[in-house]
Amino acid sequence: MFIGSWGKMTRVRPSRDIDLLFLLPPSVYHQFQQRSGNRQSQLLQELKDVLARTYSQTTMRGDGQVVVVPFNTMPVEIAPGFRCFDGSIIICDTNGGGRYKTLTAEAELADLNASDTRWNGNTRALTRMMKRWQRERNVPLKSFHLERLAVEFLQVWPHSHQADYYDWMIRDFLAYLITRANGCIIMPGTGEFVWLGSDWLTRAQTAHRHAVSACDNERDSLEASAGWDWQEIFGSAVPVFVS
């Protein structure tokens, strides 16, 4: 199954990679549990060997939780996993001697779908726009951080039901993001706390200043000035003039 931005339909062009989850039968889990050492690393190695039979000209590598297949068109990251009796999914983590960790992909998707439905598609729209900012301005926040923050923000933003307030939404989200420096997000499905840090704070503050200016310029019908401000956030993919 697709996971990550392809599974959540939050990808922006061009996509950086494709994340795939392959659920393996329980017998494979029990087979590797009989082994000693880093069982998770051994499982990823066996997965890599199986894939190499088909893609013999492609140099693959294990990377913590996935096997990376670096196709020229687009890299594919493959995570093997197992479905547990309680319905959860566990995946490999080869770090620290090896362990299994609970995958939150299904819970994240369900939460995102509920938010996007409730707020007229604004959750995915906001996530995609902020991922464009993240990419254009090299913002050290992960995509799932922005997604979770978008879900949280729209729960409290007074215009969440509006389908055409994108300028205000960006401006106010960036203001909200600034207040979350050195805070954390809570992952659905596990309740895990994920630290946000503050390495990205100055970039968010700069983007917020441009968003405020862009909204003011739009109010005053200064279209080109507003366009330049938006380009400072999202890059040249945003036109200066909108007909």
Image: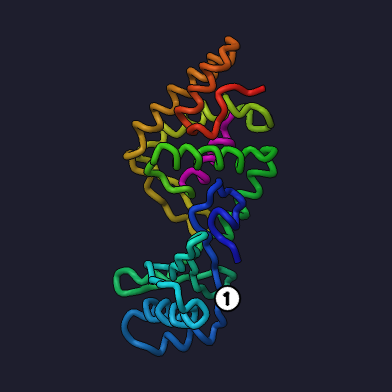
Residue 164 occupies which quadrant of the picture? top right
Give coordinates of residue 80: x percent, y percent.
50, 73
Q: Circle 1 sits in a helix, a strand or a loop, which is it?
A: loop
Q: Residue at x 45, y 34 (%)?
A: 177
Comparing 158 with 59, the one in front is: 59
Q: Residue at x 69, y 44 (%)?
A: 117
Left or right: where 140 falls relative to 228: left
* Vertical arrangement, residue 217 with respect to residue 203, above or below: above
Q: Residue furthest top?
A: 220
Give coordinates of residue 118: x percent, y percent.
68, 41
Comparing 41 with 172, the one in front is: 41
Q: Residues within 10 Å of mark 1 (few under 14, many from 20)?
A: few
Residue 192 part of the magenta segment:
no
Q: Quadrant of the N terminus?
A: bottom right
Give coordinates of residue 231: x percent, y percent.
49, 28
Q: Quadrant of the C terminus?
A: top right
Residue 202 occupies which quadrant of the picture? top left
Q: Residue at x 59, y 22 (%)?
A: 241
Q: What colouring style does the render use?
A: rainbow
Give coordinates of residue 172: x percent, y percent.
52, 27
Q: Main secondary structure of the magenta part?
A: helix
Whether residue 131 is visible to the viewer of this picture, yes or no, is yes
* Vertical arrangement, residue 53 with respect to residue 65, above or below: below
Whether residue 83 is visible to the viewer of this picture, yes or no, is no
* Vertical arrangement, residue 152 with respect to residue 30, above or below: above
Inspect the image, locate mark 1, and give the three-letter code of the amino acid beneath it: Phe
Q: Which residue is mark 1?
A: 85
* Vertical arrangement, residue 160 with respect to residue 146, above or below: above
Comparing 113 with 18, the one in front is: 18
Q: Residue at x 36, y 71 (%)?
A: 94
Q: How many marks?
A: 1
Residue extent of the magenta highlight:
145-157
